[in-house]
Image (spheres, rainbow, N blue to C red):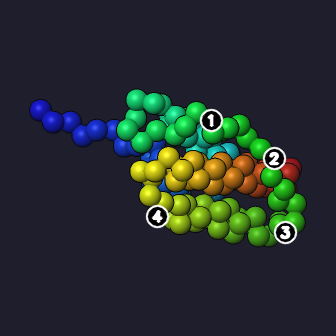
């Protein structure tokens, strides 16, 4: 019996982002969960047993991002714009290690931005 192989973590991340666009606007908690999901998928992609694995030299730790210049009324629009960037990322050729590293770095920037936006949304709710 032939079972379908598990999807590569990169494609799981892309699918998650695409399905998220249909659920906008997101709560701050959902945005934070999405950023965590991106980082978890990248960690899973660092498994050298995968055919197209991500080099362990890629630093997956969160970085601080500045989103202070975004007006409160535009925060959810910015979240949608940032998630929409994954549509462009889905066009990457992930067969080359350099492309996978570039893809991962873009994903990390997006995750960091989502975390910062979620924090801003929480601050406005309080």
Q: How much space separates mark 4 and mark 1, taking CA atoms?
A: 23 Å
Residue 40 sits in which quadrant? top right
- Which disc, if any, is residue 64? 2
Q: Report the residue that reaches farthest toward the left.
A: 1
- Which disc, if any, is residue 71? 3
Marks 2 and 4: CB-CB under 8 Å? no
Q: How much space separates mark 1 and mark 3, taking CA atoms?
A: 36 Å
Mark 3 surroundings: few (<14), some (14-19) or many (≥20) residues within 10 A = few
Q: How much space separates mark 4 and mark 3, taking CA atoms?
A: 31 Å
Q: Where is residue 76 in the image (x, y as percent from the top left)?
A: 70, 64
48 left or right of 76 in image = left
The mark that comes first in sequence, 2 or 1, is 1
Where is 70 relative to 103, above or below?
Answer: below
The mark that comes first in sequence, 3 or 2, is 2
Q: Where is residue 79 in the image (x, y as percent from the top left)?
A: 68, 62
Give the residue drawn at x 46%, y 50%.
96
Mark 1 surroundings: few (<14), some (14-19) or many (≥20) residues within 10 A = few
Give the residue drawn at x 54%, y 50%.
98
The residue beneath circle 4 is: 91
> Which secondary structure, mark 2?
loop
Give the residue drawn at x 40%, y 29%.
49
The mark that comes first in sequence, 4 or 3, is 3
The residue beneath circle 1 is: 57
Q: How much space separates mark 2 and mark 1, taking CA atoms?
A: 20 Å
68 left or right of 104 in image = right
The mark that comes first in sequence, 4 or 1, is 1
Q: How much space separates mark 2 and mark 4, taking CA atoms?
A: 27 Å
Q: How much space separates mark 3 and mark 2, taking CA atoms?
A: 19 Å
């Amino acid at each position: 019996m032939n079972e379908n192989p598990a999807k590569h973590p990169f494609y799981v991340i892309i699918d998650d982002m695409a399905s998220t666009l249909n659920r906008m606007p997101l709560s701050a908690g959902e945005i934070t969960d999405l950023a965590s999901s991106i980082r978890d998928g990248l960690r899973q992609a660092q498994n050298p047993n995968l055919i197209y694995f991500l080099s362990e030299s890629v630093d997956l730790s969160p970085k601080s991002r500045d989103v202070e210049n975004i007006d409160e009324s535009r925060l959810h629009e910015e979240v949608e714009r940032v998630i929409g960037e994954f549509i462009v990322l889905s066009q990457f050729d992930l067969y080359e290690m350099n492309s996978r590293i570039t893809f991962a770095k873009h994903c990390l920037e997006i995750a960091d931005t989502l975390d910062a936006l979620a924090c801003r949304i929480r601050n406005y709710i309080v």
